[in-house]
Amino acid sequence: MSYQVDENGFYGPYGGAYVPEVLYPNVEELRLNYQVILDDQDFQKELSRLLSLYAGRATPLYPSGFLSEKYGANIFLKREDLCHSGSHKINNTLGQVLVAKRLGKRRIVAETGAGSHGVATAMACALLKLPCVVYMGEVDMVRQAPNVERMKLLGAEVIPAKSGSKTLKDATNEAFRDWINNPDDTFYVIGSVVGPHPYPDMVAKLQSVISKELLDQVPSLTGKNFPDYVIACVGGGSNAAGSFYHFLDHPEVKLIAAEAAGKGLDSGFSAAANLLGKEGILHGSKTKFMQTPEGQVLEAHSVSAGLDYPGIGPLHAYLHDCERVKFLPVTDEEALDAGIMLSKNEGIIPAIESAHALAALEQIHFKLTDVVVICLSGRGDKDLETYINYTAAKN
Ligand SMILES: *Cc1c(COP(=O)(O)O)cnc(C)c1O
């Protein structure tokens, strides 16, 4: 059984490239070239240099005494929160902007919801000297004003998406439209393992640096070759794909994904695409997303902006169906409680996205000898206000 994308861009029934005819040449150019570029030694050398000297890799694998004692296992945090930009997203944007340069592109477009991917893209563009245009829903620009200022300071142009609900999906539509209008000189940097083939595979490979580092770190810290569990949160699924990647073909490694259950799976306010979604075509690929009986996209809800997405990447839809990855629902409240717990007991304020992965620990029974790796995908500075309001409302 293979978990790799097939030659047509599918993971089982999911994936593919369902794009309008005018976009076909852009996607096809990338499809024909991305693997050659990723495999090129000079490309790899340049990317590794930037990941280490600019982004701060390798990130530590930190043994959490507090979590280990609380849950009765050997629990480690993979510290993606220590990456430059504050999350794993920089791994992907550095890689894609380098790919764009290899393809001779002279301009970058991206979409962003909460702004984390937009900021990470703007950083990579400033560093690698390409002009950057970020589309962002007008509503999100108000909600995430500091990230808009960061992007501007980094030299990016931020264009408000004013159609529809004025949020992420509208920003995505605008970014696609821009790409259609500028097919020769522009590269579209997508922020997760979503979109038409080859994006899901390319982003998974760029994020796989996370599990590649674990292949060395786990043996040197634990004496075991592989962890018993790897746990990550899923929005589109890029930090999870990167954390799982080198363990997919080792069935003895249990892989767990935490989906945002929002106010509860049955509440009508959640973002659990695998647990609640149905098959359909979203953002250029066949995958699972939450939809009405008529097949219209349902609005997602999660307290964490990074998980507030109605769909999931096609790789994860497949990993769920063939039961290679177990998907667990985590509510807003469970995640916030887990984030506050880690802050108070380890001195690490996690992103609320990452706190979903921590909260999943409650749902698993471990053996004392188990080695458990949690991907701490990002830091929680951006979430201070949410944590504070939650604490105030509880007291
Ligand atoms: C964007 C983001 C996520 C969700 O995206 P994935 O593609 O599912 O990884 C998770 N954690 C943090 C900190 C993020 O910024």
Image (cartoon, grey):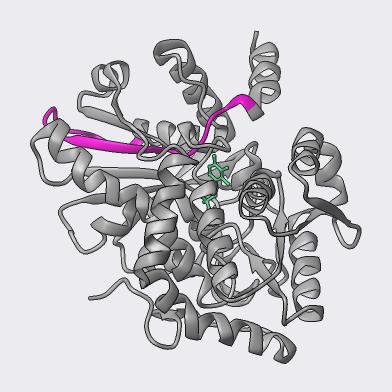
Q: Which residue lies furthest to the left in this view?
A: 223
- Residue range (magenta): 363-381
Quadrant of residue 359 in the image?
Answer: top left
**Residue 1 shows in this picture:** yes
Residue at 73% in and 81% down = 183
- Viewer-proximal residue, 249 or 131? 131
Left or right: where does residue 390 sit relative to residue 89?
right
Judge whether 363 appears above or below 184 on screen: above
Residue at 39% in and 87% down = 7
> Residue 52's spot in the image, x, y percent?
40, 42
Q: Quadrant of the N terminus?
A: bottom left
Residue at 44% in and 19% down = 342
> Residue 355's spot in the image, x, y percent?
49, 32
> Residue 83's spot in the image, x, y percent?
48, 37
Judge whether 76 appears above or below 148 on screen: above
Left or right: where does residue 339 sit relative to residue 346?
right
